Image (tube, helix red, strand yellow):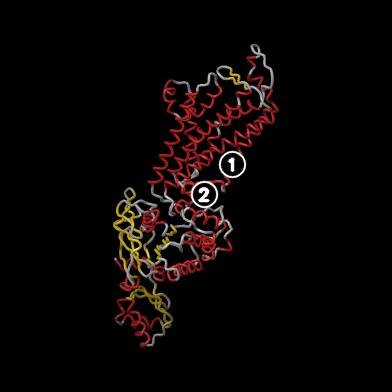
Amino acid sequence: MENIPILEVKNLSKKFKDFQAVNNLSFTVNKGDVYGFLGPNGAGKSTTIRMILSLIYPSNGDVFLFGNSIKTHRASIMKKVGAIVERPDFYGSLSAKKNLEILAKMQMEEISKNRISETLEWVGLLDRADSKVKTFSQGMKQRLGIAQALIHNPELIILDEPTNGLDPHGMKDIREMIISLNKDYNKTIFLSSHILSEVEILANRMIIINKGEKLVEGNVNEILLSGKQNLTVEVVDVNSAISLITKSEYQQNFKSIEKNKIFLSLERNKVPELNKFLVLNNIDILSITPTRTLEEFFLSLT
Amino acid sequence: MKNIYILTKLEIFKLFAKGRSYIAFGAIAFLVFVIQVALLVDGKNFFEFQTQNLRDTFLFEGNLLNGYLTVYVILTALLIHIPFLIALVSGDLIAGETSAGTLRFILTRTASRLEIITAKFITCILYSTLLVIAMALLSLTSGILLFGKGDLFVVRDTIYIFSENDVLWRLIASFGFSILGMSTVASLAFLFSSFTDNSVTPIILTMVIIIAFMILSSIDLSIFKLIKPFFFTTYMNNWRLLFEEPFNLSKLINSSLILVFHIALFFGISAWNFTKKDILS
């Protein structure tokens, strides 16, 4: 499929007095992508998102959406963009439906009440449409946040850490919505996160930034396969397993041991070989689990 | 223009969905009621006290403690304090949304920042206007119902007596002029609101400036007399010109224009700041 650029960030920089929040950042999001925007807290993700949405003005560089600069074509661009910027905040004393009606009217186009109800139904809040938002849980507010980003049927949806502060059930719900928006409704998703596994599950392409600068960008699988990952190998007889590993080529991959768990650092494509090696040497394996945090992945990159 | 009309309707809806927007109306209704009842109970003594030095020279006849006098008393008493009630709402219009985080969401819609701040400013001025109109309607109707009509007797540096037929338009014009004064205060609170991320700061700053200007204006030192023309508060009380003879129309128009200039200036700075600033909340 031909790559059609939807979002192009070109040499974007932002300096707050003496603090360089974003430095010469460039990347491209294509139509149909779920694009992971990854970085630890304070990496400059939210500042970049705010510049994309013209909430913050860049010190240098430009953002192009649908081929036009946000500086010159903001109004026409924002008709095709829906976003959640950080925490979803609403008018607490108004109902969910009223909040959406207000935001829909600020879109300056006709959005029917039916569309609002449909959106509320899609995010699972139709039965709470008339409840005041201040009575909502964090998960419900996050779903309402997604609803407000969808009411005008945008082509690009920008989600800034949408699973932040949610319990596992809430995280799962939001992730399923993101998958559905991309697969069923052909939406392009720009997903900011500091959770590597989240991006690994949802995104096809990604960029990792740190201290406002790009570390790596590209296909998710290619990036993740390129480095070593931490493995936890749980075995029945840990002494036999350790004895075997330390005398083998995997000695250099061995990191530590805890009860019946052995921790190794190994390239992803070598995991099946390790598995075969242990099994053929009569080691009973309970599980092999990759445990790769973003911090560890950073270390493998630098 | 259509966008600003839609946004203004939304702003008005949001404003009146908040409880604090009704505090000022409640406070004015309460104060008008208390002043009228107090005048009903003790108005005769009040009027006699006001005119005690004149009783040897003048003969007072007719209904001089009338509805028009009570409205004049209310105007004098309340117009000094209403600015605080107005600042409570105007100071919250932008800063309240910034601190609540809703500003992020409304600024990611199609409406431009200039359209949004213009709609908010119109709402701010409408609120001040409504408050003064409410005060006018409440005081006039209750005053006339409770005390009836009559000549207005105003004691200032000199004595002014306005015949019954000549009073109502002056009172209405005073309320009209007060709308300008209160809108200036609202614009100032609105200006501070565009600079801060919490709604308490603009309210306090507005109050501090008004109190400081009023105190400095009231001190009879030549240095303060020199700077007094540069305080907008100097012109806010010029509705009193309507209760002087001869009526100085040009001075009243001049005061009105100065207040309009301040309103435009405060809005201009607010709009410039709001359209240029980074939204970091």
Picture quarter containing residue A267?
A: bottom left
Q: Is residue A132 above or below residue B91?
A: below
Label 2, secondary structure: give it. helix
Sequence-first disc among 1 and 2 = 2
Identify the residue at horizontal 65%, vertical 33% (top origin). Answer: B141
Question: Which circle, 1 or 2, is nearer the viewer?
Answer: 2
> Which mark is on residue A26?
none
Residue where numbered disc 2 is placed = B10
Identify the residue at horizontal 30%, vertical 65% (top origin). Answer: A216
Mark 2 burial class by Cα count in 10 Å: few <14, some 14-19, many 20+: some
Disc 2: host chain: B
Residue A103: x and y in percent read: 49, 55
Q: Is residue A194 visible?
A: no
**Amino acid type, mark 2:** Leu
**Amino acid type, mark 1:** Ile
Residue where numbered disc 1 is placed = B23
Q: Is residue B22 left or right of residue A87?
A: right
Disc 1: host chain: B
